[in-house]
Amino acid sequence: MDLFEHGYIRAGVAVPTLEVANPTENSKRIYDIIKRAEQEKVKVLVFPELSIPGYTSADLFHQRLLLDESEQALGRLLEETQNMDMMIAVGMPIEADNQLFNTAVVFHKGKIFGVVPKTFIPNYNEFYERRWFASSNNRISNMIELCEQVVPFNENLFFEERKTKAVIGVEICEDLWMPIPPSSYHAVNGANIIANLSASNEIVGKADYRRDLVRIQSAKTLSAYLYVSAGQTESTTDVVFSGHSMIAENGSILKEIRFIEESTFIYQDIDIERLRNDRRKFNTFMGKTEKRDYQTVRFSFDYTHVVKQERYTNAYPFVPSKKEERDERCKEIFQIQSTGLMQRLAKTGIQKAVIGISGGLDSTLALLVMVEAFKRLKLPLTNIVGITMPGFGTTDRTYQNAVTLMKELGITWREIPIRSAVNQHFEDIGQDKDLHDLVYENSQARERTQILMDVANQVNGLVVGTGDLSELALGWCTYNADHMSMYAVNASVPKTLVRYVVEWVADTSTSESIAVALKDISDTPVSPELLPPDKDGKIVQKTEQTVGSYELHDFFLYHMLRFGYRPSKIYFLTREAFGNKHDEIEVWTVLKTFYQRFFTQQFKRSCLPDGVKVGSICLSPRGDWRMPSDASYEIWKKELESI
């Protein structure tokens, strides 16, 4: 399927080298970049403010020859691009209503779609724009004639591409720096791409501020923001320009250039579907809408070619790629988890807690969180009761790690084997103990939960749950067993992140023995250990061999819940993100498993205990995810089968 079928549009910003006050030469250089961008299949391309004559033309803007030459240069660009399937925005002065306006001229295939005048005209420090230009507030006409075309002339002008539903609004330089930029109004009225033609000079510290403006405005407006500024060849007299240009999307800078010597452009694939989904989801986005008289020009691009995605897709959306950022994320998650548990204990007056320790990742993280919470409450760590409950599948490796961890942390620990109790249960219900089926596995899980609940009653404590977000998504838990607790601290931490949080604790631990145990736990295969080990005493039952790779499941979960993507797009993104690490058949098979289990296991999520929310993806039935337990997944299945 083509890139554009998945709701992407390729947009770029271009910084040409210019000759100030030479529109003829400048239009040639602009056209050269347009030709290069066409080869890269760019569909939207934005040039700097007043890029045809040059922003620093100053009083030359009052020269009739410069104005006439600028219009003629635009005319040549229209003729040269009449067969190019690209929407282009260039900056030039336009005479209308007895005034001169600083404008963006937007055109496609030789046709001018509209002219957008600048609203906020700076006249301070090094800026003297009011000497030459009027504000859009002084505009009288709604239509003007330009290059023998009668075109819209309006600051509230949108350009909507029919297929991708990309809606492009325009503002110019200073407009962005205002308390309420025009782009804020553009966004609530439907624009999801904002183009800013700018000429922002450089002084110390300004680039950081400018970058923050672009990034934050794209986040506040849930939009893509295309910012392009005048290049170094505009530098003159007392000011220097760097061509600082950025492409941002919903709070993230996707690409950026600054102090580039030659004419250049950058581009990215903007995810229009993602922006539209977010706007529907975050209903406060339209909390207060000031109605304005917007005019929309609708058009269509041709999509007759397959384009490879020009955009980085993070294979591990829950896990920051840089170690410094990852460590900070782990620290924050750990603090949120421990704070949640601390408050639950403080507000209930309960001073003891019980947890089952298996020597696996999830129970380890939960125990570490409990220790932190008890320390912050200044309660003795002996008030934590950790119980290891060896069963038919317990290996020596996990058992020893569990015991080491409990001893070294200084909690109260107990060992309560479950084999005899489970065998008695098998005898009571007439279950063949040599039949290693679902009853064999779940009976062990339920026996362990019964022990935890009963011991909690003994010590007047609460049972802390260990299950993580990935397991809840797949329903990979035994109903009313590890599915249940009195407070769940890992409920919104995905499996791919649990491991890193445990490793972060290991790296920051002052105890070498605890660090060694945590590292080994991190290296242990994920397993419920409900089936007997092999002849060498090693784990046989490995979860990922049954349900598929957790890194795939976490990727699917993130993109389904966070952005509402359909199976075909998730499959496409998975292939882009992981490349050859997971082949097509594996991705398709695991994705099928994900949808089947996600839909059929909702009944378990509908009655989850309270748990700590740490991130944007959470499956709590009390707010974050409300879904009927009997919903059909037929349409998702059909689309997946059509891939």
Image (spheres, helix red, strand yellow):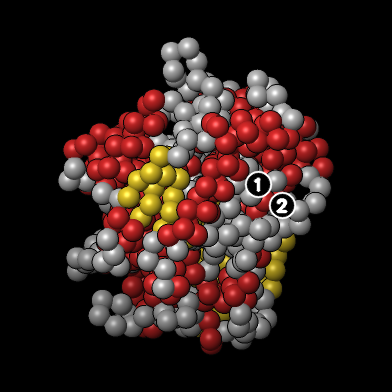
- Neighbour class for label 2 at 10 Å: few (<14), some, many (≥20)? some
Q: Residue 56's spot in the image, x, y percent?
A: 33, 67
Q: Residue 218's spot in the image, x, y percent?
A: 48, 64
Say which element carries label 1.
loop
Residue drawn 53% across and 86% down? 137
> Residue under circle 1?
479
- Whether pointer 2 and pointer 1 mark residues with C-beta atoms closer than 8 Å, the reply is yes
* Camera-nearest residue between 414 and 591: 414
Residue drawn 30% across and 77% down? 127
Q: Residue 191's spot in the image, x, y percent?
A: 61, 66
Residue drawn 48% across and 22% down? 539
Residue drawn 47% across and 35% down? 417
Upstream in sequence: badge 2 or badge 1: 1
549 horizontally vs 160: left or right: left
Q: Residue 45's spot in the image, x, y percent?
A: 52, 52
Amino acid marked by disc 2:
Phe
Kindly identify which numbered label has been placed on residue 487: none
Amino acid marked by disc 1:
Tyr
Asked if residue 617 is positioned above or below residue 62 in the image, the reply reads above
* Camera-nearest residue between 472 and 130: 472
Asked if residue 340 is positioned above or below residue 127 in the image, the reply reads above
Image quadrant assignment for residue 640: top right
256 horizontally vs 569: left or right: left
Q: CA distance from mark 2 to mark 1?
A: 9 Å
Asked if residue 617 is positioned above or below residue 59 in the image, the reply reads above
> Residue under circle 2?
603
Residue farthest to the top, as pictured:
535
Image quadrant assignment for residue 1: top right
Q: Is residue 396 visible?
A: yes
